[in-house]
Amino acid sequence: SAPEDAEIYVDGVLVSQGASLLQLELPSGRHRVSVAQKGHRVATQSLQLNRGELATTSFELEPTRQRVASHVLFAGGAVALAAGGAFSFLALNSENDAKEFVNRQKQQNQTTGELVRYDADVTRRNRYRWLAGASFAASLGLLVSGLFLHELDTPSADDLYRSVPQPGEARPLGAAALLR
């Protein structure tokens, strides 16, 4: 048994693509069974089969460092996106406070303290706008980087070739392979 969408190799030959449970007839002798799945390390087990023997094995695959890094980048991108939204909200609040001052100024004179508050609101608005833009840009960069790492995380051909038995170590794959 192996993960649902994994590829299963016996003695370096692909025998199944996407079966979680696989039943095979193999000749007696030593065989290497390898399981590969996108985003996971290739797992290999060696089986010694005697004539008429039934052997069962299961595989649990470990995620690659690249897959873990992509998930960290996705989480970082989500946090940066949320921060960009929060900074946008704060910028809008500061903008509204500054507009209220301008509307009040059209109707009556304002004090020096209110003018200082207006300048502070404009300064905060500009700072929050910059922070929101930087957060959205960082979010985009993190999410795109995470997507590339996620999509390009395929099992290495070297790992699969390492799973191929050495000459004389295993016999060729049997003719019958049944999927259940």
Image (cartoon, helix red, strand yellow):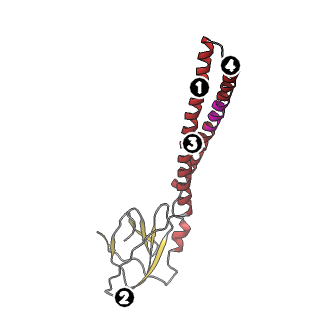
Depth order, front residue of 51/71: 71
On residue 83, the disc is 3
**Callout 3: SS:** helix
Q: Single out the residue that lies furthest toward the left.
A: 180
Q: Using the image, determine if residue 68 lies above or below residue 49.
A: above
Q: Which residue is mark 2?
A: 50
**Callout 4: SS:** loop
- Label whose residue precedes the other's in the sequence (4 or 2): 2
Q: How far separated are the C-alphas under marks 1 and 2?
A: 82 Å
Which image quarter is the C terminus in? bottom left
Q: Which residue is mark 4?
A: 111
Residue type pointed to by label 1: Asp
Q: How far separated are the C-alphas under marks 4 and 3?
A: 35 Å
- Label whose residue precedes the other's in the sequence (2 or 3): 2
In percent of width and height, residue 16 lies at 38, 67
Residue type pointed to by label 3: Ala
Q: In the picture, residue 106 is in which quadrant? A: top right
| Magenta-drawn stretch contains 133 | no
Which image quarter is the N terminus in? bottom left
